[in-house]
Image (cartoon, rainbow, N blue to C red):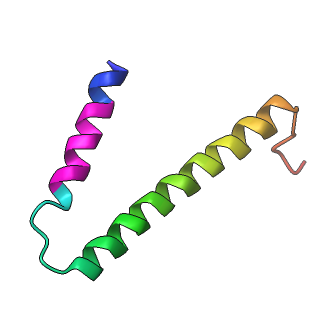
Amino acid sequence: MIMGNLLLIKEIYIEAFKDWKSYILENYFKIFSWACLALIVLATYALIFRISTGFSFSNL
């Protein structure tokens, strides 16, 4: 199941940049998509870290 989802995401990524004409714009969006992925991974790590250390999420 997970491998199928990863292959689907890979195919969507390849199709998104397949027929682009502008080299600069293509590379810009590739860098932007990798930066977004890195930020999502960082936010996930921070959330898991806070949960594992017993952080209280309420302000009460």
Q: Position of residue 20 (x, y in %)?
A: 14, 71
Is residue 16 rendered to the left or right of residue 37?
Answer: left
Where is residue 44, by image quadrant? top right
Is residue 57 rendered magenta in the image? no
- In the rendered image of this protein, does residue 29 appear above or below residue 4? below
Looking at the figure, which quarter contains the N terminus?
A: top left
Q: Position of residue 56 (x, y in %)?
A: 87, 40
Q: Residue at x 57, y 57 (%)?
A: 39
Q: Position of residue 5 (x, y in %)?
A: 30, 30
Q: Residue at x 90, y 48 (%)?
A: 60
Residue that sits furthest to the left in the current view:
19
Residue that sits furthest to the front in the current view:
23
Is residue 14 rendered magenta in the image? yes
- In the rendered image of this protein, does residue 34 appear above or below residue 58? below
Task: State the residue in front, 43 or 26.
Answer: 26
Where is residue 49, by image quadrant? top right
Is residue 24 rendered to the left or right of residue 20?
Answer: right
Q: Residue at x 87, y 39 (%)?
A: 55
Task: State the residue in front, 51 or 27.
Answer: 27
Task: State the residue in front, 56 or 31.
Answer: 31
Which stretch did the figure color magenta? 6-15
Where is residue 8, by image quadrant? top left
Is residue 44 rendered to the left or right of residue 3?
Answer: right
- In the rendered image of this protein, does residue 3 appear above or below residue 37? above
Is residue 55 rendered to the left or right of residue 12?
Answer: right
Q: Position of residue 43 (x, y in %)?
A: 64, 50
Classified by dominant secondary structure, the portion drawn in magenta counts as helix
Q: Residue at x 64, y 50 (%)?
A: 42
